[in-house]
Image (cartoon, grey):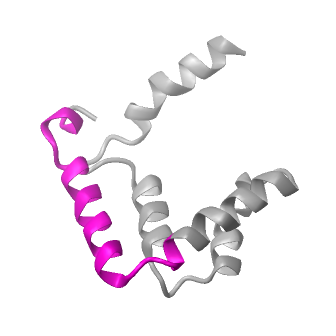
Amino acid sequence: MKLIVVLLLAALPLYCYAGSGCPFVEKMVETTLNSNVSTAEYIDVLKRYINDERTELAVVEFKDCFLRQSKDILKHVMEMMETIYNSKLCYYF
């Protein structure tokens, strides 16, 4: 099992090779920070990765946390993510 995890982590940068990072991760960050996306829509987007009730509850709490934030804070978080994507440390990924 550990070998599979190591291989997946090694393959992820190759899969996500793009200018600013992995398109899937970027889409999920954008969906998470978008206050127009409801919790139900968010769960629908992630349902393929939700295996049980605990995971679904965690996803609901995570999205609700962002829904309670002001638009200004969400804007700053998105700017932070863009800075991370464009940082020198992420350049090779």
**In this image, 93 relative to 55: left or right?**
left
Give residue 15's quadrant in the image. Answer: top left
x, y percentage for residue 22? 39, 48
Kindly tell me whether residue 19 is visible in this rendering.
no
- Quadrant including the C terminus: top left
Image mark count: 0
Nearest to the observer: residue 84 or residue 73: 73
Residue at the right extreme? 53
Can residue 58 be seen here? The reply is: yes
When the figure is inspected, residue 86 is found, relative to residue 17, above or below; the finding is below
Pick the residue in front: 33 or 4.
Answer: 33
Question: Does 84 appear in magenta?
Answer: yes
- Apparent side of residue 6 relative to residue 79 in the rendered image (left or right): right
Which quarter of the image is occupied by the N terminus?
A: top right
| Residue at 30 percent of width and 66 percent of height | 78
The quadrant where residue 75 appears: bottom left
Q: Position of residue 3 (x, y in %)?
A: 63, 12
Q: Is residue 67 left or right of residue 2?
A: left
- 41 in relation to 77, above or below: below
| Whole-percent x, y for residue 61 in the image | 66, 65
Residue ID at (43%, 71%): 33
Q: Main secondary structure of the magenta part?
A: helix
Q: Is residue 7 magenta?
A: no
Residue at 55%, 82% (x, y): give it.
Answer: 37
Considering every residue shown, the one lying at the far left of the view is 88
Task: Name the residue located 23 percent from the left edge and 37 percent from the top edge.
Answer: 90
Instruction: Determine the residue located farthest toward the bottom in the rendered image.
Output: 36
Magenta segment: 66-91
